Amino acid sequence: MDKLRDFLKSWPGRILLVLCLSPLALLGVESYFGGSTDPNQIAQVGEASVGLSEYQTAVNSRRSEILEQLDDASLLNEDVLHTQVLKGLIDRTLLEQQAGKLGMTVSDDTINRLLRREQIFQDANGEFSNVQFANFLRQRGMNKEQLFAEFRNQLSLDQLNASIVGTAIYPMKAVNQLIDLQLESRDIWLHRFNWQDYESQVTVTPADIQAYYDANQDKLKSDAMVDLAYIQLSPATIQIDEVTEEELQQQYEAYKQGLAVVDERKLSQILVTGDDAKARADSIKARLDQGESFAALAKKESDDPSGASGGDIGRFNPSVFGSDATAIETALQGLSVGEVTAPIKTNFGYQIFMITEDNGSQIPSMDSMREELTAQAKEYKRQTIYADKVTAINDLAADGFSIEDIAQQENVALKRIEDYRKDNNTSVLSQPSVIKQAFDEFTIQDQAVTSGIEVGLGTVWAQPSNYRPTQTLTLAAATPVITQTLLKQKASALALKDAKQIAANIKTVADIAKQPVDFQALGEVSRQTTLLTDKERSLAFSKQAPEDGVVALASETEIGASVLVGDRIETARQSQLSDNEKAQTAAIIRDNLGQDQLQDYLDYLRLVYKVEINEANMAGAQVQ
């Protein structure tokens, strides 16, 4: 299958796999269980309609699918999304009506048999369960008749679809011919004539410009543009202070919680209070160091009720010690069972602890994880500050502050893009979501700051000004564009003339070196080569060379003109694909042809059933 995948990535393979929005994308099983018809119509299709709620549900579902595949949500083009979803819903409605008109239906017995096979309705023994079936209907607010009607409609739709898509024919002979094309190769010699080299030899007169303008005036339009001021914020730009021990402790506790374990150390303590607490604690610690029993000293010296039981306080729980937890945790680090801490000054007095049991030795100590915890604490702090800053900027934008005021108040760099285009946008903010908000009618009208737009790993806020709508260019405004276009056309014509003269003089490989221009020897190339431009690639295999010579071909190309010299076209004797892979390739081709047939059939149905779109409801749904 690797060879099949490689083929499908090749030049003919890509031709076969042109992606299109198929109405089948909206013919899924989830449609069996849709709700009632929405009285607010998006479109009237014959005698049926597409409801507002149905449309919004489909948009949300499709958006979620796309966003799962995108790393940057700002790359989603909402206008295209809404257009494609509406087309899919209309296509489905057209097919549903046609299926009904053709009498395509399914009996109750067939539906019963299919439903009994559905796993969702089966019990633990794989048998159909009336209880589960009833629960399913109750959860969806449907009765059996409604479910059968939806199921029958879907199956009828599937029948009609299969009768169109499944009838596409593409013989294996044609498949083999396509495969042979991508196996073709030949030696190529190339020389390119750049049109700029001929620019000084041509002139463009006012009459030429006027004639071009008169013939192409409808195409000579300015781009819709604004001047854009914007600020951009990302977590990476947030500066943070050093993290505290308390913040490290929080990350450590979160780490332990993530492991679903608790601190298994059991402790005993001796607490001493009063004015002489420090001196008493030091004396007790000295006696412990000399080998006296911790439990005995706790009973005799501790001012805490736990002293009666030898100081036992159970498992270590940081929350019990409040602000003293970090100091105690630090003192306990590295201690083994039976070892004692130095006296610790806490809010209770002076405390001495001994670890009596430790069943949590598998948990790394906080000190051993300090570097990792520090990085996590910094990132948590950075993300928190970033989220707070995004909220603050959004609030300022909603309150009507200008982008300049927001940038100054939040200490964020203000950036500008002049002539920010609605179409053919190649700026640093070319994402569809940014363009959509920058050219929003109300944003332009109020010259308001947009809400935060998520772009990659950050957020952008923009304020458009000086809006210039699309309009037909005047002759004066169009003259520079026309002049450049005509210069290239005339210069390319001269380049092509020279290219043809060179090509006419080449009959053999030896003739290549006799020409007044240098040729680049590309060696053996195939139709998938990246050494040639698109036009050159199509030219390179357009004509076979004679048995004892080469063929020289000249053509106008993207850069001016090119001469390609090729020897005999050879085809690999044996296909790289197995018979099974060829059959799968044929199936892919037939499916694509079937989809084309389906689109043709839908175009026909649009002539049969009147389709009217409610533009007002459509516009309202798109802004939600």
Image (cartoon, rainbow, N blue to C red):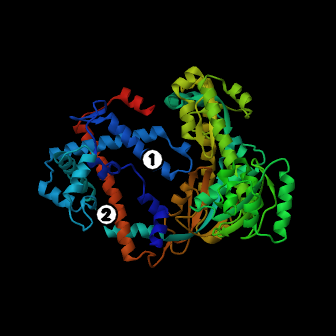
Q: Where is residue 418 in the image (x, y as percent from the top left)?
A: 67, 30
**Which residue is under mark 2?**
170
Q: How many labels does the image show?
A: 2
Quadrant in the picture for the C terminus: top left
Mark 1 residue type: Ser
155 displayed left or right of 521: left
Q: Where is residue 39 in the image (x, y as percent from the top left)?
A: 27, 30
Q: What residue is rendered at 66% in x and 45% in y?
A: 383
Query: Most extreme residue toward the bottom, as rendered?
Result: 573
Q: Is residue 507 above or below residue 493?
A: below
Mark 1: secondary structure: helix
Quadrant in the picture for the N terminus: bottom left
Q: Is residue 20 above or below residue 621?
A: below
Mark 2: secondary structure: loop
**Which residue is under mark 1?**
64
* Sequence-first tag of 2 and 1: 1
Residue 107 shows up from this direction: no
**373, 604: nearer the viewer:** 373
Q: Residues within 10 Å of mark 1 (few under 14, many from 20)?
A: few
Q: What residue is rendered at 41% in x and 66% in y?
A: 178
Q: Tell me the distance, in whole angstroms, between the alpha carbons under discs 2 and 1.
A: 36 Å
Q: Quadrant of residue 44?
A: top left
**460, 156: nearer the viewer:** 460
Q: Is residue 217 above or below residue 304?
A: above
Q: What residue is rendered at 34% in x and 44% in y?
A: 88
**585, 619: nearer the viewer:** 619
Mark 2 residue type: Tyr
**582, 188: nearer the viewer:** 582
